């Protein structure tokens, strides 16, 4: 079922859904959203693209094996907790850094965001591993 309409819609929806998933991750620490929901939205965008264009094109779009995303996400989530542990505080205590970005002013980046990005990558890799392997069958 690869119609022209579905392929065109998937091509335009993919960047919008990926941008929305990043928005969900960035706002997830203080409001509903976060790494899990963002990972589900990102994986659903790639799955829509795979349904429209084929699994081979979707795998080429990823440029990496989804299992590598799982490993990278787990390492990132672990690293966010170890920063506080090696600093003499309890594991997973939030650590914050203030950065000054030109045009944006001062922003505060913390380990909860790093943990959310790790969860994002784990969910993205897990869902894509399962669904793409089922679509190949």
Image (tube, rainbow, N blue to C red):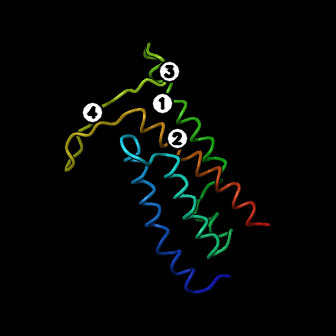
Q: CA distance from mark 4 to mark 2?
A: 21 Å
* Crowd around label 4: few <14 · some 14–19 · many ≥20 (10 Å): few
Quick one: SS at disc 2?
A: helix
Q: Is residue 117 or residue 101 the one in the foreground?
A: 117
* Crowd around label 2: few <14 · some 14–19 · many ≥20 (10 Å): many
* Crowd around label 3: few <14 · some 14–19 · many ≥20 (10 Å): some
Residues at marks 1 and 2 touching, judged by CB atoms closer than 8 Å: yes
Q: Earlier in the sequence, mark 4 or mark 1?
A: 1
Q: Residue at x 26, y 40 (%)?
A: 107
Could you say where residue 113 lies in the image, as x and y percent from the top left? Answer: 42, 39
Name the residue tied to disc 3.
91
Name the residue tied to disc 4.
98
Could you say where residue 27 lies in the image, as x and y percent from the top left? Answer: 37, 47
Name the residue tied to disc 2.
118
Could you say where residue 101 lies in the image, as x and y percent from the top left? Answer: 24, 44
**Considering the image in quadrants, where does the N terminus appear?**
bottom right
Q: CA distance from mark 1 to mark 2?
A: 9 Å
Q: Earlier in the sequence, mark 4 or mark 2?
A: 4
**Considering the image in quadrants, where does the C terminus appear?**
bottom right
Residues at marks 4 and 1 touching, judged by CB atoms closer than 8 Å: no
Point out the residue furthest to the front here: 32
Q: Is residue 116 above or below residue 128?
A: above
Q: CA distance from mark 3 to mark 2?
A: 16 Å
Residues at marks 4 and 2 touching, judged by CB atoms closer than 8 Å: no
Q: Residue at x 75, y 62 (%)?
A: 134
Q: Which mark is residue 80?
A: 1
Point out the residue furthest to the right here: 137
Q: Earlier in the sequence, mark 1 or mark 2?
A: 1
Q: CA distance from mark 1 to mark 3?
A: 9 Å
Q: Is residue 102 or residue 2 the one in the foreground?
A: 2
């Amino acid at each position: 079922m690869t119609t022209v309409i579905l392929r065109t819609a998937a091509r335009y929806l993919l960047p919008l859904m990926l941008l929305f998933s990043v928005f969900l991750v960035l706002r997830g620490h203080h409001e509903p959203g976060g790494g899990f929901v963002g990972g589900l939205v990102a994986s659903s965008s790639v799955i829509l693209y795979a349904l429209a264009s084929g699994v081979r094109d979707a795998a080429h779009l990823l440029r990496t094996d989804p299992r590598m995303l799982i490993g990278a996400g787990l390492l990132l989530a672990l690293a966010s907790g170890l920063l506080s542990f090696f600093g003499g505080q309890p594991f997973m205590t939030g650590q914050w850094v203030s950065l000054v970005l030109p045009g944006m002013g001062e922003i505060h980046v913390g380990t909860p965001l790093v943990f959310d990005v790790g969860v994002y990558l784990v969910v993205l890799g897990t869902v894509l591993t399962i669904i793409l392997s089922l679509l190949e069958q």
